[in-house]
Image (cartoon, coloured by chain):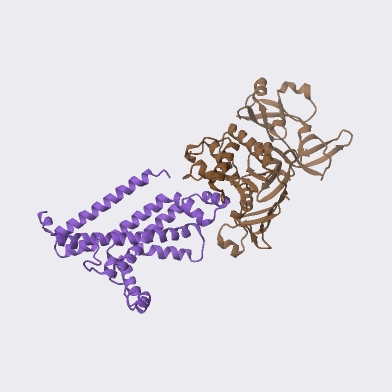
Chain colours: A brown, B purple
Amino acid sequence: MGIKVDIRKRYYRRKSDKKKGIDPAFMLDASFETENELVVLFGRSGSGKTTTLQCIAGLLEPNGGKIAVNGKVYFDCHKRVNLPVQERSLGYVFQNYALFPHMDVKKNIAYGLKGLSTEEKENRVSEMLHLLHIEGLESNYPSQLSGGQKQRVALARALAPKPDILLLDEPFSALDMVVRMKLREIITEIQRELGIPVFFITHNHVEAFTIADKVVIFHDGRIQQIGTPEEVFYHPQNRHVAELVGLSNIFEDALVHDVNEMHKTLRLKCGDLQVLADKPEKILSDTVSWGIRPENLRILPLQDKCCTEGENLFRAHIKSIMNKGASKVLTLEIAEHRRFLIAEIANHSFEEMEITTGDECLASIQRTKIVMF
Amino acid sequence: MDSLFQITDDKMLEYIWFPLLITLKIAVASTFIVAVLGSIISYFLARREFMGKWLADVLVTLPMVLPPTVTGYVLVVLLGKNGAIGGIIYNITGWTILFTWQVAVIAAFIVSLPLMVKTTTAAIEAVDRDFEYAAFTLGRKELETALFITFPLAKKGIFAGIVLSFARAVGEFGATLMVAGNIPGRTNTMSIAIYSAFQAGNNELANLLAIILVTISLLSMAITAKLVNSWKI
């Protein structure tokens, strides 16, 4: 049981390119298996997330491979099976909601209900209105709804026919923070209650982390890593994943040396920059890449050097300061090594330090927070 | 203008009522066919990929750029007693379609089809495909989706196409004259009647017919504009 996806899809710049044997402009090669859980497809725009979702939905036909949902084969290239969208029993929520503008909320929700009596339809619509807390909106038209209400109606419409699988294509990208948080809770509740697989596309790593049971990370048409949010966020397998999950400070091809089995530490040497790091359980090769999240960099005023001298402490110039609401994002240049670091610090800590652009400070790379891949 | 009122009741019927009624009959019939076939053709042009799509597009559009006399001539060649299509009809039924009001409907249909197809295709293309995809994911087949989602969302464009086609059919002259002639009481439409009256030096009649035609056109456009403005989508 669960979902098995193993597909390839090629896109050519021009139709004639295929005949001429020119390489495709984009190629999706995605293969993964998941249970009936909340799966987040995560990646940048153009990485293949939506193409994958549309192939599962049947809105796009893959060039090869197989898709099966809970034992039901949706697509099988070898057996020439390609179930029409209408027969896949799925709920799909579009990024722009795609609510039918000429129908009121009630008609929108009831549109997918076939073979039911009027009374049964009414009951199902009422159930959906209740589930998504949108009672009272049934006679409104989509143009009269707020973004959050539209999204709830779109969800209600997708869930009304009791689908086998729910697919959501960046459903919250146009909504404000508060509405997003409420809707995330609703999606999680619905998934637990119905027990159906839910595929959710996002390029917001906070969203991915908060709602996912499993995250599938896409880059350039290929899957880079599959795992729980903790696995992919704290143990990214490569640079692409590391960048996607918010590791802004990445150092590639660092030499591993001075492995200390007793203290479980090692040194990473990147040019003339050396840092001490915790030794991971396995060291895969002599050279690794490492990174640290901006929020895990500590900034200290220059005079604190005496107190914390020793571990991974570097003098740095503050090149720029950007306000990010509750925090500040600082670009730092390590004086000796001409390397740049991005640090994020809470506003209150920043104000206490009384530092500004052009000042010198100390940047501390906490060894316990270093991520190697 | 006094001479206008000298037209007797008999003449009134012959000179004014008949051309008006035959024009409306031809225009309504051709517009109905144009609306149905034009919508189907437009849907395929807007939403499907098929072999020879460009050729279909060119063939439908051709009468818009050709002089109506050429369209009329081609119809005469095809539909005449010895024509490719007319010959078959004649051999089976002994009936020739030329110089009847039915052939005027065909002529009006051909010249107004491009207006319907161009306008409607653009309107259908402008409908966001996500609405159709949403209907598919909700289990609805393509025909249901086209009828209940695509066409209702493109209705302003479809209606504009119908109005333009009707206006074109009402004003049709060249092709109609060639295939249906100018038979009083049978095929003399308003535009042909105006031309005949003018040729015969009967300017009063030409004036009256022109005023009627302009009034009908203005009224239909005003009603259309009001109706379309009242639609929210």
Task: Tell me residue B63's x, y (percent).
Answer: 36, 64
Residue at point 42% right, 50% down?
Answer: B155
From where the camera sits, is residue B53 visible?
yes
- Image side of residue A265 versus residue A62, left or right: right
- Image side of residue A267 versus residue A172, left or right: right
Residue at point 67% right, 27% down?
Answer: A345
Task: Tell me residue B171's x, y (percent).
Answer: 28, 59
Q: Nearer the viewer, residue B2 or B175?
A: B2
Q: Is residue A180 above or below residue B119?
A: above
- Image side of residue A369 versus residue A158, left or right: right
Q: Is residue A366 above or below residue A20?
A: above
On the image, which quarter does residue A307 sit in?
A: top right
| Count of numbered circles on the image | 0
Q: Is residue B6 above or below residue A360?
A: below
Q: Which residue reaches farthest right?
A: A262
On the image, which quarter does residue A63 sit in?
A: bottom right
Task: Tell me residue A328's x, y (percent).
Answer: 63, 28
From where the camera sits, is residue A6 visible?
no
> Which of the image's four quarters has the C terminus of chain A?
top right
Task: Tell me residue B151's x, y (percent).
Answer: 45, 52
Residue at point 66% right, 24% down?
Answer: A350
Q: Nearer the viewer, residue A160 or A82?
A: A160
